[in-house]
Amino acid sequence: MSEVLRTGVADALVVLGLLVMTVGVYGLLTMPDVYTQLHAASKAVFLGVIALLGATALVADEPAVVYRAVLIAVFLLLTTPVSAHAVGRAAQLGAESVESRSSGEVSTWEGDDPATLDHDDPRPR
């Protein structure tokens, strides 16, 4: 691949990554509740950083840099859903409500009171 084409694709990936993360920050600030904010933030971080890592791997001259970028991408692929689930579960146990901005209604999860939750019960709620 020619150097000019490689640099152009890397620049496009950097711009794409920055745009995705900017949209994610906008979603984080405008979404009505913690669950939709969490969705916007986790998707923006994952997709934006993956685009930036792709740009890094394209312009890197050393194979070690490419390997590190791939390892970081795999780490994010594995840990982003797990951390989003942990934060969502903590919000649920903390009795965070689900708010619908379109109808103005606020609904709550069944069993929001953490004192009444049976943590040993394997059935989904």
Image (cartoon, rainbow, N blue to C red):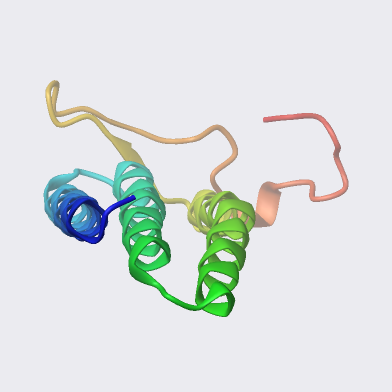
Observer-nearest of 81 and 118: 81
Q: Nearer the viewer, residue 46 or 67?
A: 67
Q: Position of residue 85 (x, y in %)?
A: 57, 50
Q: Residue 44 or 95: which is nearer the viewer?
A: 44
Q: Is residue 87 left or right of residue 100?
A: right
Residue 94 vs 100, above or below: the answer is below
Toward which corner of the image does residue 57 lie, by quadrant?
A: bottom left
Horizontal relation, residue 22 to residue 120: left or right: left
Question: Residue drawn 55% across and 32% down?
Answer: 110
Residue 64 falls in image quadrant: bottom right
- Residue 81: x and y in percent read 56, 49
In the rendered image, which quarter contains the C terminus?
A: top right
Q: Residue at x 51, y 68 (%)?
A: 69
Q: Residue furthest top?
A: 103
Is 122 on the left or on the right of 9, as rendered? right
- Is 85 or 47 nearer to us in this picture? 47
In the picture, measured across the screen, residue 96 lies left or right of residue 87, that is: left
In the image, is residue 123 above or below residue 66? above
Total number of numbered labels? Answer: 0
Q: Position of residue 14 (x, y in %)?
A: 21, 60
User: Which residue is pictured at 11% across the width and 52% down the height?
Assistant: 26
Query: In x, y percent, where is residue 112?
Result: 54, 44
